[in-house]
Image (cartoon, helix red, strand yellow):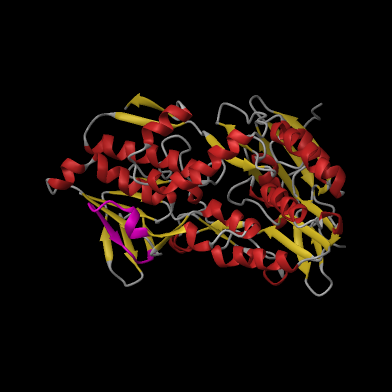
Amino acid sequence: MATPESGVKPTTVVDSRGTMCPGPITDLFRAYRNANIGDIIELWATDPAAKSDSEAWAKRSGNEIVAVIDEKDHIRIQVRILKKGRQ
Amino acid sequence: MDIIVIGGGSGGTLSANLLAKQLSNEIRGGQVRVHLISASQHHIFQPGYLHVAFAGQDPAEIVREERSLVRPDVQLIEEAAERIDLRSQAVTLVSGKRLQYDYLIVATGSVPSPEAIPRLSDASLNFHTGPDESRKIWDTIQEFDRGHVVVGIAGVPHKCPPSPNEAAFLADDYFRKRGIRDKVKLTFLTPYPRAYPAEPMSRVVEPRFKERGIEVVTFFNVESVDPARREIYSLEGDSVSYDLLIVVPPHRGSDVVIRSGIGDADGWIPTDKNTMRIVGHENAYAVGDATNIPVSKTGVTAHLQAITATSNIVSAIQRRRELYKYNGRIHCPFEMGSGKAAFVIGSYDTPVKEVHPTRIRYMMKKSFAKFYWRTLSGNWDWIFNIYFGKTHMVETA
């Protein structure tokens, strides 16, 4: 289920609209590699699998899904980077 | 009129041959010249790396002289391109020679980059950087008697999406044949949520991995490796120890694309996913691994995109007013051990479907490996057309 607009400003926007699995999650991983702790990555996707894949990854990796926002023709998934590497 | 194709891999070689074939009258009449710039004198059948690495195939069997694969009416330039200037429509070679073009196809491929991950080059063998590196895997596994073999994906994107899984299946086959599988633990690392990124094919892979005792570690985006401790670490904070590490490095765009500033941050060329035109340039195209389009980086996709790009150039030169549009068709052979293979099939509008491995599909894969060199001539596309069906649409421009 989508959450309402978070009011959080993303550090990075990743536009994966038009790509199918594994496009969006691949783009999210590439952004994660370049992100810093505290950054907000906002993933734009049209592939429905992007939501469940991002949520599963965030849960496993200790990062936080801030919001999943439904737009007319895509979703915006905001991820706060809380953990990266061996801290 | 000059058409320049840069890159002597699958997409570039086929593009040059298709252009020369379809514009043979114009070439004979002196109105058109087709130039192919290839940095290497050798052409490698890259899917063969897997069999060099895990089945001991002779590396010489997957390499041919580029010159032997190019039509005589293509002007082959065996030299690397230094810079591509899309605005002034020119390509500069490393020798400093500058060539103007009327039409351009960039097919400069992708570059495996183990150096992108700290200590990966020291720690891991791989079968993506060349025949000699692939051979090192074969030499190493023959000496390997017991321990933990870790296979998988060290970074994305990489070419040939099934190849890391294929490596796990073939490694399993190899150790079984030697009768030491019970002494070898086999683990597959992936950044994805499942054993294969596309869920329908993962449903095919996962039970087979389980049956063979190949353990899968998901959500493992490799951060670094410590070769002294024999440990590999993920961005997610996990670690896995190994005795032998064989992971596929992340890839980036080619040096000439990066130097020329015509790619994105990772060197992939922004390309229209249907027409194969480089975004913002009517007469310049990109095909194969070099593009940023959201399909697998494989020889088959490069082949199909080369057909689209060259058809659009020929149509423009012959004033046919036809616009060809690639439909995103992918068709990746996927070997799953025990002499069986499947295919990963999809397109922009058709999600990847579940395809199970069979002996016949394995024979098809093996037959294609032998047939590959002929497909580069452009003379056998009627077989592709029958087999693949529609791979592009044609609109009146």
Query: Which residue lies at the image location 67% right of the left edge and 29% below the top edge?
Result: B354
Magenta part of the chain: B66-82
What is the quadrant of residue B200 in the picture?
top right
Query: Which residue lies at the image location 81% right of the left edge and 30% below the top edge?
Result: A3
Query: Which residue lies at the image location 79% right of the left edge and 57% below the top edge?
Result: B235
Location of residue B196 in the rendering, given as x and y in whole percent from the top left corner: 71, 41
Q: Is residue A12 visible from the viewing direction of this image?
A: yes
| Closer-to-camera residue (B131/B345) | B131
Q: Is residue A6 visible from the viewing direction of this image?
A: no
Is B81 magenta? The answer is yes
| Drawn side of residue B123 relative to residue B372, left or right | right
What is the quadrant of residue B334 in the picture?
top right
Query: Which residue lies at the image location 27% right of the left edge and 61% below the top edge?
Result: B99
Location of residue B127 in the rendering, given as x and y in whole percent from the top left corner: 62, 59
| Drawn side of residue B147 relative to residue B32, left or right | right
| Closer-to-camera residue (B214/B339) | B339
The quadrant in which the C terminus of chain A is found is bottom right
The quadrant in which the N terminus of chain A is found is top right
Looking at the image, is B68 positioned above or below residue A73?
below
Looking at the image, is A59 positioned above or below residue B290?
above
Location of residue B253 in the rendering, given as x and y in whole percent from the top left corner: 52, 57
Which residue extends farthest bottom?
B228
Which residue extends farthest left?
B29
Location of residue A78 in the rendering, given as x and y in whole percent from the top left corner: 76, 41
Is A12 magenta? The answer is no
